[in-house]
Amino acid sequence: MRASAVAGIIFANSYDELLEKLTSKRSMASVPFGGRYRLIDFSLSNLVNAGITNVGVITKENYRSLMDHIGSGIYWDLDRKSGGLRILPPYNIRGAKRYNGYIEAIKGAMDFINRCNCEYMIISESEVVANVNIAEAVNHHIETHADVTVVYHNGRFPENHPDTMLLSFADDGRVNSIEFPTKQINGNANYSLGIMVISRRLLVELIEDAYNSESLGINRDILAPKVSKLRIYGFCHKGFAEVIDSEKTYFEANRMLLDDNVRHDFFNKERPIFTKTRDDMPTRYGTKSNVENSLIADGCIIDGTVKNSILFRGVKVEKGAVIENSILMQGVSVAENAQLDYVISDKDASIGADMILKGTSKKTFLVKKNQTL
Amino acid sequence: MVKKRCVAMLLAGGQGSRLGVLTGKIAKPAVPYGGKYRIIDFPLSNCINSGIDTVGILTQYKPLELNDYVGSGKPWDLDRQNGGVHILPPYQGQKGGDWYKGTANAIYQNLEFISRYDPQYVLILSGDHIYKMDYSKMISEHISNNAACTIAVLEVEPEEASRFGIMNTNPDGSIYEFEEKPKNPKSNLASMGIYVFSWDKLKKYLTEDENNVNSSNDFGKDIIPAMLNAKEKLMVYRFADYWKDVGTVDSLWEANLDLLNPKINLNLSDEAWRIYSRTNSLPPQYISKTSAVENSLVTDGCEVYGKLDYSILFENVTVEEGASVEYSLVMPGAVIKKGASVKYSIIAENVIVGEDAKIGEDPQATESDWGITVIGDGINIGKNAVIGAKNMITNDVLEGVKI
């Protein structure tokens, strides 16, 4: 399979409202995750690790931080003469309003799609944390002669997500039912991961039809109604996967990386996760530092206690400060003797000496970007 | 080519034989430093921070890793349409070619490269030192002194002066004599191996030196004395910040641990003078519940389950449960297995230290012949093996063996 036969599309503003507080000044795609990443790093790396060098990122609003992060695409080797990374900002196609659903968004990106000169397309959402073998998914798509291949996972159904598909399969692996459950599901279920493989020709055809009938979403308005007409197959992603559908799942998904097995599976050598690199010094641990079960990026200075937490680049923890069960984003500083438990702090916040911030496992305490407490 | 005011030439061809096994496979400037740097990051970052965007790197010994590392120069913003970084190995011309015979000959063979930019000044650097320096200040002094050559010097302790090339100067800072490692030094101004030449003078003296069959073609031994003989104006430029030659195992170890010393001013992520490096996309470091980490630097891709004190872990190092690393450097990809102990050592890239092995010793624990222990690139140290102080290990060590 020629890698240039496949191109990718990523939705940057996918379901921003699910993480309202963290997306007030950024898109879902640029939400920080896992100590040094942004959510888009996972979809971009998935595509790049499959040899795909032609990627369009569809944006809608709040995309400045995303542009800062991905730049020319060099960190993913996507700064190319031919193909490479294209940012696709809203394109007016129907009056002055921006798009309301994925169908309109793809319609707006039709120029990019038509110029791709590829046979297959990967459509990818940003609210999914998974290291998926896309090359295998494409092979599976070809072998099964599928019209659409939906990447799915078997696990806890993301009940807060409005458009995740609950899938059932026939014996030959073809999807024979797509549901959008409204009630809680007990136990594990097969659900879609916001990644699909489709031929470019069929995508164009389906989008044009759906757009003309004023449909909005791909899952609800194209795939579900056509489940018996289209050959829809599933490709099971067996590794770690989380659909970020709330602040709570965001917090839990981050903390799952503290598990050795999850971390080693997710950050494997065959399919590395690429991200923008900075020139930070290594992290410095002082004489009074006491760190347990934590994931820590470069450029931190730690003189206090850090347990069961995730620290992004350049976090400072002064002596006597105690940080437990927390996620501190880039540039956060915690002064002497402050105590944090179940806190998510957005970038560049300062937490003053002796402050006590306590959330719970059910409801984390959120500190806003640049906030001083 | 667009004319450049100053071109830098970085001498990176030396073998660095005193680093022994650490430069067995790589040139000295490519030796890892400080957790995520290579020695060459210092002159390259200093260049770009000083506004010099045209750098020739003269390579000769084991250039593969260094070439890969420098690449297009992107990490230092030295990937340019005009100027930028250029790797300059020895080459064959119509009349044959030669290896670089000495530091001066290496520049001589690349006069054509410098000429393309028609500079006014040429900065000669080496890839052996850890320091942050604003070369533009030195060039300004060179210009205001109207000198033919300006040499950066550092005041060293008088008792150490006999280890260096010493500049003997007049009160106005002009040099009247250069002495290489003098037995009875007359001054304590040591050459840092950093020269600014006016381009016309450099061209003249390099060409004359090349025609002199008796010359060893070295800047310190030949070019500087020849210019002094000809009564050219040679000036010193005094530098007073941190500077360390990392030419020996001990000095490399010390220069690394200096990063952990709060009394030493060597902040590499200072926004005003950042040291850049080529970094990989690796996961953040993981520090486990069973660990104890103090006074150490740890970087991306590391996993620490054991004890760390006064040590530096480079990328992708694993320290397993019950293992301890003290006063040591552990270079990229090395694994310290369960129960192993590493003290006062340099563990090179991709070494595996087996379970319960003991590497290195406390200075107090041994008699006269104490020193840093070095384990070479890719070596396997077997379970329960014991490697004493000051050893340099170049072959795998089997289980239980004592050295």
Image: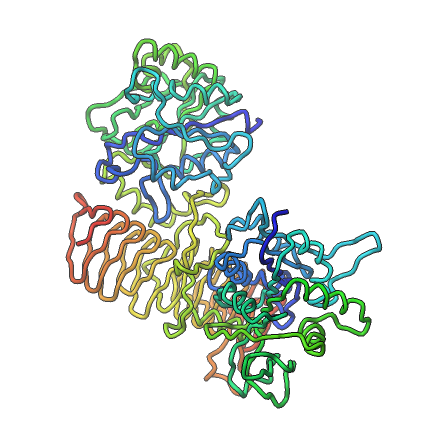
User: Is A301 rendered above or below residue B213?
Assistant: above
Residues B247 and B183: in front is B183
The percent coordinates of residue A317 (x first, y second) are 27, 61
Q: What residue is drawn where x is 34% and y is 37%?
A: A64
Can you name the residue that lies furthest to the right here?
B95
Q: Is residue A306 left or right of residue B314?
A: left
Image quarter of residue B236: bottom right
User: Is A42 rendered above or below residue B129?
Assistant: above
Q: What residue is drawn where x is 68% and y is 77%?
A: B231
In the rendered image, is residue B296 in sight? yes
In the rendered image, is residue B354 in sight? no
Label total for image: 0
Q: What residue is drawn where x is 26% and y is 34%?
A: A245
Task: Give the quarter of the figure containing the C terminus of chain A.
Answer: bottom left
Q: Is residue B257 left or right of residue B90?
A: left
The percent coordinates of residue B135 (x first, y second) are 52, 64
Can you name the residue that lies furthest to the bottom here?
B184
Residues A233 and B253: in front is B253
Q: What residue is drawn where x is 23% and y is 32%?
A: A17
Residues A284 and A351: in front is A351
The percent coordinates of residue B20 (x first, y second) are 62, 70
Colour scheme in use: rainbow
User: Is A272 rendered above or below residue B403?
Assistant: above
Task: Give the quarter of the figure containing the N terminus of chain A.
Answer: top right
The percent coordinates of residue B104 (x first, y second) are 70, 67
